[in-house]
Every structure is written in C-alpha cells, then in structure tokens.
Image: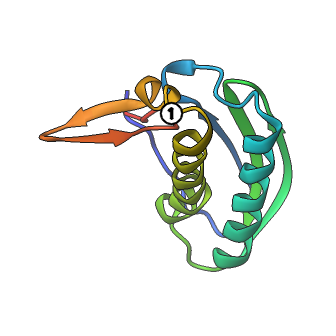
Amino acid sequence: MKRTSYNLPNHAHFLTFSCFHRQQLLTSNNLRSQLLIAWNEARHTGNLAIWSYVIMPEHVHLLIYPKDEPYEMCRVLRLLKEGFTRQAVAYYRERTPQMLNRISVLRGQRVVHRFWQEVA
C-alpha cells in the first residue's frame, strides 16, 4: 500500500509514526524528552503548530497544523523525524550500543539506522 500525502492549506493533519519493526524504542524518559525537543525545533523551523501528541512505547500520534502556504507534507515529516533519529542513534551509541543492532539495516554496501518504520 502506498502512502498518500495531502498538502491542503488550512487543514490540520493527524500523523502516526511507528518505531522500526514496532519495537518499543520509546520507553526511555531521556529519549522521549529528546523527541519533544526535536519536535519543538521542527515546529519552529517548519512553522508548524503542534496541537497535541501522544508518545507510546512503540509509536507516536501527532496533531499538527502547518502555518505556511503552500507546504509539503514530505518536508514536514522529514523535519519531525530525521533530527530525532540522529539524536536517538547518538544516544544509543553512547549509552546502549547493542541497541544499534536492533535498528540497523543494510542499504547497498552501508549500514543505516532506522528509528521509524519505513512507509511504503
């Protein structure tokens, strides 16, 4: 199934992100705090309102409102996910390196880390 994105001015968006392979990667208070900090930065950078959120151990829900017209949801999603993924990988490297094995995938000849489940 292919994901469809809508760039509709003056509309809020309900988003759900699942952790890689639906693993419970968001059980640490430190990681959840880093996620909120990353979302706050994305909110400023992307000119978004974050109306509400829920952080569960293996997924998150967000209700956002893009303030810019026009906007692209693919850019908004990248802002909300990528910065935190880099922070989570750094956190794992420093504190629990064995966790990196749980989020590692081979892309060609290189290993990349996936915190969020890839959307088809």
Image label count: 1
Image height of 48 relative to 94, above or below: below
Between 9 and 106, the one nearer to me in the picture? 106
- Whether residue 33 is situated above or below residue 65 in the rendered picture: above
**Would residue 89 appear left or right of 101 to someone viewing this image?**
right
Q: Is residue 40 left or right of residue 59?
A: right
**The quarter of the displayed image where residue 107 is located:** top left
Residue at 52 percent across and 27 percent down: it is 99
Whole-percent x and y of residue 51?
Answer: 87, 56
Q: Residues within 10 Å of mark 1 (few under 14, many from 20)?
A: few
User: What kind of element bears circle 1?
Assistant: loop
Say which quadrant the C terminus sits in. top left
**Residue at image point 51% right, 56% down:** 82
Res. 28 image quadrant? top right
Residue 10 visible? The answer is: no
Q: Residue at x 64, y 74 (%)?
A: 46
Q: How is the image coloured?
A: rainbow
Quarter of the figure with residue 27: top right
Could you say which is closer to the camera, residue 38 or residue 53?
38
x%, y% of residue 33? 81, 49
The residue under the point 53% across, 60% down is: 73
Res 3 visible: yes
Depth order, front residue of 31/80:
31
In the visual, does 47 lie left or right of 101?
Answer: right
Q: Residue furthest left?
A: 109
User: How far from the left and from the top, in percent, is residue 105?
Assistant: 31, 31
- Left or right: residue 64 compared with residue 22: right
Q: Nearer the viewer, residue 16 or 71?
A: 16
Where does the N terminus fall, quadrant-wise?
top left
Amino acid under disc 1: Pro
Disc 1 target residue: 97
